Image (spheres, helix red, strand yellow):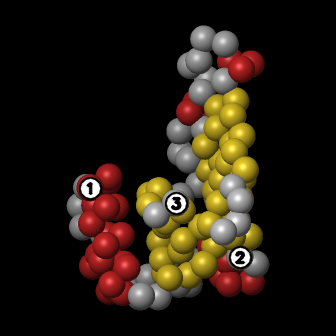
Amino acid sequence: MIVWGIWWQDAFWFSTGPRTRKAKNIAAMPRVVIGTDKADEAVILEGAAEEITDRAVWKQLAKIYNQKYGGDVEPLLTAAGGCVFRVQPQVAFAQDEHAENFANAVTRWHFQKE
């Protein structure tokens, strides 16, 4: 799934509504694959999603999210009873189509569990 989110505290964070297909799928199976919206500079992350219910963490996350995207996401999270997820990465892939040598412009990272 392509989602907007942020990289924070060594993980990928995003939000969605509690009744969305994303939230329902994660509740049933927390393993996820996430892609960025820029296909020419693609980043694909595989990992396990964990729902974060601590509202104090939401407030911190909202500030960072607002800096990246503009606006104010906090009222959307709290008013809609939103869901916030933290994805602990296991594998990440990246490629840059604009690289001089496209064949060598693909990278893969493996993350170790702590």
Tell me how far mark 3 sits from mark 1, CA to CA: 18 Å
Residue at 34% across, 61% down: 65
Q: Position of residue 110 (x, y in %)?
A: 73, 50
* SS assignment at label 1: helix
Q: Nearer the viewer, mark 3 or mark 2?
A: 3
Please identify, in this view, whether the residue under mark 3 or under mark 1 is nearer the observer.
3
| Crowd class of label 1 (few under 14; some 14 to 19; many from 20; radius 10 Å) | few
Asked where in the image residue 80 lies, by quadrant, the reply is bottom left
Q: Earlier in the sequence, mark 3 or mark 2?
A: 3
Look at the image and tell me whether residue 19 can be seen.
Answer: yes
**How far is mark 3 from mark 2, CA to CA?**
18 Å
Label 3's element? loop
- Residue 8 shown left or right of residue 93 in the figure: left
Residue receiving disc 3: 10
Label 3 crowd bin: few (<14), some (14–19), many (20+), radius 10 Å:
few
Is 90 in front, or is 37? 90
Q: Residues at badges 2 and 1 in contact (C-beta under 8 Å)? A: no
Q: Give the residue type at disc 2.
A: Pro
Q: Is residue 43 left or right of residue 69?
A: right
- Mark 2 vs 1, N-terminal side: 2
Check residue 30 in the rendering and tell me which mark sits there, or answer none: 2
**Residue 87 placement: quadrant:** bottom right
Query: Looking at the image, is 102 positioned above or below residue 62?
Result: above
